[in-house]
Each structure stands twice: as structure tokens, then as C-alpha cells.
Image: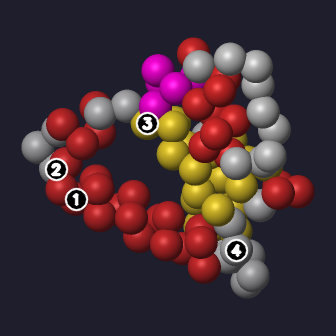
Amino acid sequence: MIRDHDGRFVARVDVLLPGLRIVVEVDGAVKYARFDGRNALMRVKRREDALRALGYRVVRLTWSDLRRPERVLAALDLGIRTSA
């Protein structure tokens, strides 16, 4: 759970790498496919803007990305390389 400088709740995230100030979010299309998909997209955008304003980098992955470690490492951009 991430809070702002005043202790107010900002977001609950999928994965937090606190020392690196990286938030990892794993997405599926379900929340955007519902009748309120546009509103869901705007909520996600505002939430990410709030996280970035607090100094976090937000990395978005899909469930299929999790089966490919090289994609995860590339998205995190930590300078770690895997053998292909």
C-alpha cells in the first residue's frame, strides 16, 4: 500500500520494489472490457499520475509477459541481461 507524504492512501499495487521506487502492475483486459471501460482507464491514469508524482516509476506488464523473464527484465530496465 502506498501513501502520500501526509499519510493518505494513494494506491494498492501488484508489486512494489521500494528500494528502486518501482511499481509493477500486471494487467488483463477484463477491467477495460466492461461497460465502464473508459472510466476504468481514466482511474488507472489518475492513479499512475499520483504514483509518479510521488517519485515512483510505473511498469505495466501483461500476464503473458510473466512467462517471458526477458520481457520482465527489459520492462524493469535494471541493466540485467539474460541469455537468449
Tag of residue 55: 4
Position of 58 compared to 28: left or right?
right
Under mark 3, the amino acid is Asp
Tag of residue 36: 2
Label 1 or label 4, whichever comes before in sequence order: 1
Q: Which residue is mark 3?
A: 27
Between 42 and 82, the residue placed more toward the observer is: 82
Under mark 1, the amino acid is Asn
Check the picture and name the quadrant holding the C terminus: top right
Between 27 and 34, the residue placed more toward the observer is: 27
Category of crowding for the residue at label 1, using alpha-carbon neighbours closer than 10 angstroms: few (below 14), some (14–19), many (at least 20): few
- 67 in magenta: no
Task: Please tell me whether mark 4 or mark 2 is closer to you in this view.
Answer: 4
Tag of residue 39: 1
- 63 in magenta: yes
Res. 12 in view: no
Looking at the rendered structure, the secondary structure element under dot 4 is: loop
Looking at the rendered structure, the secondary structure element under dot 3 is: strand
Task: Please tell me whether mark 1 or mark 4 is closer to you in this view.
Answer: 4
Q: Residue at x 29, y 33 (%)?
A: 29
Q: Farthest residue to the right: give it.
A: 19
Under mark 2, the amino acid is Asp
Category of crowding for the residue at label 2, using alpha-carbon neighbours closer than 10 angstroms: few (below 14), some (14–19), many (at least 20): few
Q: CB under 8 Å between callouts 2 and 1?
A: yes
Q: Position of residue 54 (x, y in %)?
A: 67, 76
Q: Position of residue 4 (x, y in %)?
A: 69, 76
Q: Residue at x 64, y 39 (%)?
A: 74
Label 3 or label 4, whichever comes before in sequence order: 3
Mark 2–mark 1 Cα distance, whole angstroms, equals 5 Å
Label 2 or label 3, whichever comes before in sequence order: 3
